[in-house]
Image (tube, grey):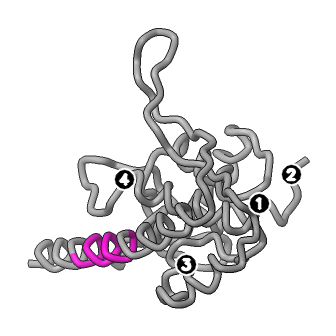
Amino acid sequence: MINSKITKEIQEFLSRDDNSRVLPGKADAIKVGSDKVQKRVLNDYMYNLHTKFLAETSYKVSRSTFYNKKPRSIAHVNFSSRSVCLCQKHQKFALKLRCLKNYKVTLITNRDKFLEVHSDEDVNKILSKIQKTSVRYQEWKKMKMKDGKQKMRVVDLELPTEEFKEMMTKTRTEFASHIHKVKSTTVKRCYSNEG
């Protein structure tokens, strides 16, 4: 039986701005119990979000349980009306933050919060706390399957600590720039759809 803490974490995860977006119209609110809640739309398929949730947390939650815990106020993604980024950069950065958490140098695995809280200088201080000679981390990569097709899979990788630090610093800077572009594009689309 899944406990209420995990249920809450799944619902908070799906309600995050990187996983779903709020619909802006007045008619987009629905009643949940005695409250009116603004509807949200997922930014990706539930299958991918389940994989991402497992990558960010230490919970072992089945796909069906994860699907059943989606709040009624969050609708499934409709790619024909997509206005947000659905790329692997988000998931790759999340996996690297999970690695930092595993090495006990940060507690933050939420990408947006990490960018908000930590400057480039802070990231250097965090990385300097890693005492190992090499760092094991995970990353999304295309892997050749037995049937010859290529599929995205989470793979285990390892780098010398200094190389990992350089990569992480570069990744943080690139991801911050990427987020800025995504938000700018989304805002422009929202304004262009208003008239």
Tell me which segment is drawn in magenta. 175-184
Q: Extreme right residue here?
A: 1
Q: Which element type, helix, strand or loop, lies under badge 4?
A: loop
The structure residue drawn at horizontal position 47% and vertical position 75%, both measured from the top left corner, is 38
Say what amino acid the circle numbered 3 marks: Lys
- Categorize mark 4 by other alpha carbons within 10 Å: few (<14), some (14-19), many (20+): few
Image quarter hosting the C terminus: bottom left
Residue 30's tag is none
Asked if the residue under mark 1 is in contact with the one under mark 2, i.e. CB atoms within 8 Å, the reply is yes
Where residue 110 appears, x then y in whole percent? 59, 72
Q: Which residue is mark 2?
A: 2
Mark nearest the camera among 3 and 4 is 4
Where residue 155 appears, x then y in whole percent? 59, 39
The CA distance from mark 2 to mark 1 is 7 Å
Q: Which residue is mark 4?
A: 87
Residue 36's tag is 3
Say what amino acid the circle numbered 1 marks: Thr
Say what amino acid the circle numbered 4 marks: Cys
